[in-house]
Amino acid sequence: MRPVITTVKDVVTTQVVSVEQDTPFAAIAAALRQYRVSAFPVLNQAGQVIGVVSEADLLAKLALSGGDAHMPGMIGGILHHQQLEKARAITASDLMTAPPVTIAPDATVQDAARLMYLCRVKHLPVVDADNHLAGIISRADVLSAFNRPDEDIRQEVIADVALDQSPASPHAIEVAVKDGIVTLTGKAETSETGHEIVRRVRHIQGVVAVRDRLSSPPPVSAGFDVLARFPSD
């Protein structure tokens, strides 16, 4: 059984609303309301993604349009200059966050999840090799990878476990899956084999967690003989 690996192109939304870099503030705000989205990719004249403008970027104008002098104490002192510039912005190119965090269609959903988590973004524009917009992927799209039947996960885990089990003991490890949680019970041939199986199972698509109930025989120390020589009297 071949492992299931969901890529970005499997879950991407290709019908994407984008804005051009000279789109005015009011038009962006109206489009956010109309399409009920929280962010737009910003394109240059060549159709390449050059930034992302979000609700948070627009909110800066309302929150900071009076400058940081009206912000209390430390809050005003730590406001970043870039955020104050956003408050004065009138077009998408002024508002947008750039350079954008993007991802390729052939990347895995795990790659997308990692980028979203590390960069603290909710959406990733999907771009081709020339940086042209191919779609957009959201957190909900990424989390769809966990929407996988337990039995499908179980069958893939069984196939994976079999790779490390000798023909003499192919069923020494039992696999149960409930709500994406995999429980492994039985005996691995070595402690290292057990750890490796658990590590790989954690990376199978749809696995929420792994309960390791494996045991293994103690390591066998190599035997050796000692030839003692004693001085003669």
Image (cartoon, helix red, strand yellow):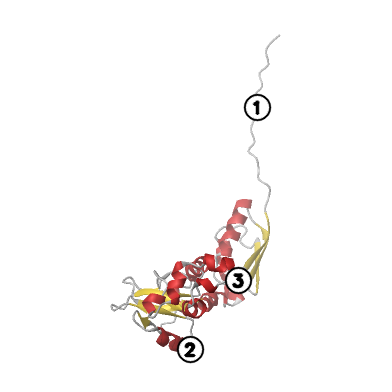
Give residue 187's position: percent from left, percent from top: 67, 57
Q: Secondary structure at mark 1?
A: loop
> Who is closer to the viewer here, 2 or 66?
66
Pointer 3 with pointer 1, Cβ within 8 A: no
In this figure, which residue is indicated by the disc labeled 1? 226
At horizontal 62% and vertical 58% (from top left) the residue drawn is 169
At horizontal 65% and vertical 27% (from top left) the residue drawn is 226
Residue 166 in view, yes or no: no
- Distance between mark 1 and mark 2 Cα atoms: 84 Å
The C terminus, quarter of image = top right
In this figure, which residue is indicated by the disc labeled 3? 154
The three-letter amino acid code for the residue at tag 3 is Arg
Q: Is residue 135 above or below residue 213?
A: below
Q: Dot 1 surroundings within 10 Å: few (below 14), some, or many (20 or more)?
A: few
> Who is closer to the viewer here, 57 or 188?
57
At horizontal 34% and vertical 72% (from top left) the residue drawn is 131
Q: Secondary structure at mark 2?
A: helix
Res. 133 image quadrant: bottom left
Give residue 108's position: percent from left, percent from top: 46, 69
Pointer 3 with pointer 2, Cβ within 8 A: no
Q: Dot 2 surroundings within 10 Å: few (below 14), some, or many (20 or more)?
A: few
In this figure, which residue is indicated by the disc labeled 2? 33
Mark sitting on residue 204: none
Taking the image as shown, residue 55 lies to the left or right of residue 185, namely: left
The three-letter amino acid code for the residue at tag 1 is Val
Q: Is residue 92 above or below residue 221?
A: below
Q: Closer to the N terminus: mark 3 or mark 1?
A: 3
Give residue 200's position: percent from left, percent from top: 56, 61
Taking the image as shown, residue 122 lies to the left or right of residue 192, namely: left
As drawn, which residue projects farthest toward the left? Answer: 46
- Distance between mark 3 and mark 1 Cα atoms: 50 Å
